[in-house]
Image (cartoon, rainbow, N blue to C red):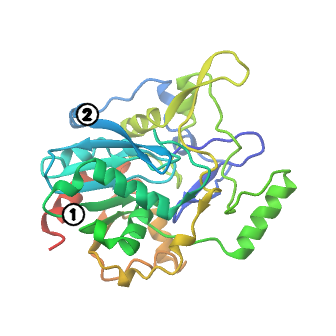
Amino acid sequence: MADDKTGAIAATAVVDEDQPTPLAPDMPPEIGSPLARFKGQAPEAPAWFHEAVAKRPERTLVPVDGANIELLVWGKLGAPGLILVHGNSAHADWWSFIAPFLADNYRVAAMSLSGMGGSDWRDSYSFETFATEIHECAKAAGLYEAPVPPIYAGHSFGGAQVFYSAAHHPERMRACLLVDTGFGGPPSPEEIARWEAEERAAGRTPMRFGGPRMRGAENKVYPTLEKALTRFRFMPPQVPGNLYIADFIARRSLKPAPMSDGSGQGWTWRFDPGLWTKLDRTGMTAIDGSAVAVPMAHIYGDRSEIIKRHGLGSGRGDQIPSTVPRIIIPDSEHHIMVDQPLALVAAMRTILAVWPA
C-alpha cells in the first residue's frame, strides 16, 4: 500500500480491517520512504524471484455490475481452484511472485477488487459487491470446472472479503484461507457523526457511508517515476523485509497521469483515494465465525501489528474462532509476502496439502 501527504491532509496507516489511522510525522526513512535510496532503479533480486515473475499470468478484465475487474490466472484448467485476494489499496500483482509456486497443483487466480489495481472505481463499495467480484472472477478463471469448488484466500482486507463470502456464500468455496487478517467491524453512529462534522467543517459534502477521509479528493501526480517510488510505503508502517519485492509492488501500484499544471505526463497511484469513505462496512456486523460452515485456516506473521492488537485485548479479531488452524510465520510483520515470501509459499503449500480434509 502506498500513501502520501497532500497539503494539510495527514498521512495514514492501516490497522485491523485496514482502517486508516494517523501516522507519526517523524517516520524514519527506512519506513517512510524505503525505495528512495535506489533513485528510481530496481533493487537486485534473487534468481527465484525473477523465475517466478517470468511465469506470466493470463491477464483479462471481467465485467461485474458495471465495472471491469482485473484478473490474473496461472495453471492448468481443470485443476483444483484457488483464488487470491489482496489487501486494501493493493492489487492482484501482490500475488504474482507467490502464485507461480502454487500453479503446479492448482488453477490459481488473483484479482484486483474494484477501486484498486487495474480495476474500475465505483461510486460506492460494499462487502457484498466485493463478494460478487471474487465469485465472478473465479468463474471467469474456470475455477468451477474442477471436480471440487475453489479455495478462497485473502490477505488483510482481502481476507475480510473472503471471510464475508464464507459466511454469506459458503456454497461458492471449499475452504477459506486467511492471511494476516483482522476485523474492525462497521463504524459506530458516534464515529459517523464525527466524520460527517469534520467533512462539513472542511466545506465538503459527507459521503453516504461516512468514514475518515484517508487522503485528498484526488491522488497526487508526481513528475517522475522516481519521485513516485520514493513516496511508496507500507501500512501498517514497517521496514520492508525485501526491498526488491517492495519495488515490484510499488511500480505496479502506479499509472501514468497528466500533470495538473499541464506540464506533461506524471505518475499517480492506481487506487481510489475515496474508497474507504465510500465503503459500506455494515456487512461485517454480527458475523459469528464459529457459525461459518466452510473450513477456515489462518496464516499470520509473528510480528504483525494487526495480530498484536488482537492479543492486547482490543476485542477485534474475535470473529475468527480459536479452533481455526493457525500457522505463524517467523520474522514477519503484516505483509508476509514482502517479508517472508518463500515461507508463505511453504506454509500455503503445506496447509493445502492436508487441509481441508
> Residue drawn at (64%, 49%), measured in percent from left and top?
274
Return the residue nearer the eye: 37 or 115.
115
Instruction: Please tell me how crowded label 2 is: few (under 14), some (14-19), or many (20+) other residues with Cα within 10 Å.
Output: some
Depicted 164 relative to depicted 80: above or below: below
Q: Quadrant of residue 20?
A: bottom right
Q: Position of residue 279 (x, y in %)?
A: 59, 59
Q: Quadrant of residue 71?
A: top left
> Residue drawn at (33%, 29%), measured in percent from left and top?
44
Q: Position of residue 59 (x, y in %)?
A: 32, 36
Q: Position of residue 56 (x, y in %)?
A: 25, 33
Return the residue nearer the eye: 283 or 202.
283
Label at residue 56: 2
Q: Disc 2 and disc 1: Cα gap in Å? A: 24 Å
User: Which structural element holds mark 2?
Assistant: loop
The amino acid beneath tag 1 is: Pro
Return the residue nearer the eye: 253 or 79.
79
> Residue drawn at (23%, 68%), measured in percent from left and top?
174
Is residue 15 rendered to the left or right of residue 332? right
- Residue 181: tell me if it is visible: yes
Q: Position of residue 72 (x, y in %)?
A: 31, 42
The amino acid beneath tag 2 is: Arg
First in sequence, mark 2 or 1: give its number: 2
User: Which structural element holds mark 1?
Assistant: loop
Is residue 287 rendered to the left or right of residue 337? right
Of tags 2 and 1, the one toward the viewer is: 1
Label at residue 149: 1
